[in-house]
Structures are given as structure tokens and as C-alpha cells.
Image: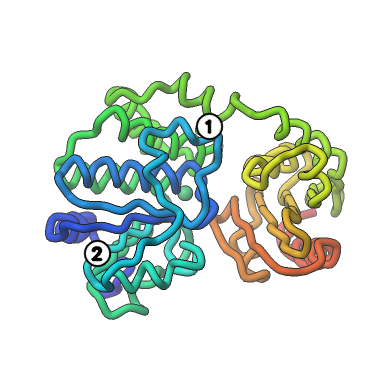
Amino acid sequence: MKKNRSSMKEAAQLVTSKDRFLVTAHERPDGDAAGSVLSMGHMLRACGKECFLFTQDEVPPSLDFLPGVTEIAHELPEWVPGSYCLVVLDCNEIERVGKDGRKALEFCDSAMILDHHLGDGFCGDISVPCVSIINTRACATASLCFDLFRELGWEITKDVATCIYTAMLTDTGGFRYSNTSVRAFELARELVLSGADPYEISLRCFESRPLSKLKLLGLALETLEVHYNGLLSIMAINPEMFEVCGAREAETDDFVSYARSLDTVEVAALIKEAKPGIVSVSLRSKRFVNVAELAGEFGGGGHFNAAGFRLAGNPREIKEKLIEIAGSYLGRKGS
Ligand SMILES: [Mn+2]
């Protein structure tokens, strides 16, 4: 049996059989990562299970309205190995959890992955029982959490609906991206019926930006450049810009969408040097370029239309290499 193709029923059986959970997601958590971890935590606790919520990095301030967000820890406690079920959400490689990912795995006697990114999962690499549901068609990992709760017959509370709705809203870019499916709308309807407030959540997600962020966006837009007749757009941010604006790294989460919004663009990139020598690149595409594959050439990954990678190096050199390699991807179908 291929371990990355478990059924929801198998996942439900694992959850039912365990009492203690360590729930985590990818480092630098976004709306889907945090929303998935919190919805899982709320549901497990409501069923009398013990759970420890962990993300390597802090949840961005823009998501501090999520119910229970302060209960997510960013350090692992000293534990006896082998007594928890590890739940990994919104990523499927243990390294994506962060530097403590391997340590988290040691605590556990079983594991479960729920994710919608491309990848095979780590079940094949570990010896403990492992359930893996990787569905790249799911609009958000939180929608898979929802399916699991349904399978278990658990009732969705207002807090859980708020966490899952936020995850879906952010991962679909406000129900605009290519993952915005019929199922996404059906699920959104159910979540609103369960108490999620669409207007309030959208205000918190999209219209509660700190001044520092808009100032930084202004500087970033000044750097916008295009290549290959406008098919490729690139924006860049350096440490001085963060300094001048008093902005934090997490505040740049959606900047690449401005580069993508240009009429001629197929591929957009944001090259961000938050700390000197550490370069994060966010990639987006509109139609035919698989940016997960493009990111893979630099050791990263993600989805067909949204991906990224992180490297130590010189941002100018990384940009030159990116322009060259992106050119070959655009040449396959571009003008
Ligand atoms: Mn996601």
C-alpha cells in the first residue's frame, strides 16, 4: 500500500485510537497553517484529547484574531520520546516544519499528514504507523481538516469555522486563485452557517495592514522590473528597506501578488533579503508555468501557481539565475 494515499477513514481511526497529539505545520506559518493547527487543536481538546500546538515561528500579527492563537508554542518542551501522535499540517516534508521537525518526530509513536502541496510525504521514511492524506486539489489544508472532523462526526463550532474559513480565504487569495473550486464555495457556505463571519474575517485578513507594511510595499513597487516582453516581473526587498519602514519579514506575505497583477505577466517573483545573505524568493504564475517545478530548481517547492525557495547567497546573483531559468520555462509555451 502506498503510504501517501491513506483514506479519511484511516485518519479518523488513528485519531480515535490516540489520546495525545503534537500538532504542527510549516515554519513561518500562514493563514492555512495557523488556521489548520488551531482548528485541529480546538477539535481534539473538545473531544477530551490532550494536545500540544507548535509552529517553529510566530504566527504573523495579521492573524492574531484567530481564536486560541496564543496557545501555539514556538518551542518544544522536554518530553519523553515516543508517546505522542504527530500531526503535520500544510506541508509533507518533516524539514518544512523547521529546525525542530526531526525532534518533534522523535516524540511520536505515530504520525498523520494532511496537506495539499505537491510531494510524497515522509511516511515512507519512518518506522511508526503513519497516515498521509496529500490532496493537491484541496483548496486549503484546513478543508482536509474539515473533512476529517466530518468523518469523525464532530460538530464544527464557531471558533473552528472561523479558523477554517480564514485558512481558505487566505489560501485562495479571497476566492480568486485557481484552487477556488465548487467545493471551496460549498465549504465556505457550511462554515458561514457554522458561525464564521465573512466580512469580519476579510477585514482582518485584507484590510488591517500596518502603516509600515504599506510603506514597504511602496519601496518594493519602485523596484518592479519586467523581462521577456513583460512575461516575467520581479520585485526586490533588501534589509535597508525593512529598516527604513520598521517593517517585519512576515509583512511581505502578499507583495508578490502585486507583481503578478501586471497585465502582461505569466511569472512573478519577489526576491526578499530580510537578513543579509539570506534570500527568500516567492514565485507566482497565472496559467502555464509550473512554479513549483521552477522553485524546485533552487531546492524549493509548492503548488503549480504558487511556490518559493530560500537560499543563502547574493540576491543579485540569485536574480540573474532566476531570470535565466524562468526564461526557459516561459519559452516552452510563451511568445
Ligand atoms: Mn495551504
Q: Which residue is mark 1?
A: 174
Q: Secondary structure at mark 1?
A: loop
Q: Quadrant of the C terminus?
A: bottom right
Instruction: Indicate the position of residue 123 as horizontal and vertical percent values.
Output: 33, 72
Q: Quadrant of residue 318?
A: bottom right
Q: Is residue 275 above or below residue 210?
A: below
Q: Give the residue displayed 59% in from the left and 51% down from the top.
A: 305
Q: How is the image coloured?
A: rainbow
* Residue located beneath label 2 in the image: 84
Residue 134, numbered circle: none
Amino acid, disc 2: Tyr
Looking at this view, is 58 or 96 the one in front?
A: 58
**Number of residue marks:** 2
Residue 317 is situated, as x and y percent measured from the top left of the image, at 84, 67
Query: Is residue 207 shown above or below 95?
Result: above
Which amino acid, mark 1? Gly
Q: Nearer the viewer, mark 2 or mark 1?
A: 2
Task: Determine the image quadrant of residue 89.
Answer: bottom left
Picture residue at 53% right of the left edge, 30% below the top: 205
* Quarter residue 20 falls in: bottom left
* Nearer the observer, 242 or 316: 242
Quick one: SS at disc 2?
strand
Q: Residue furthest top?
A: 199
| Mark 2–mark 1 CB contact (< 8 Å) | no
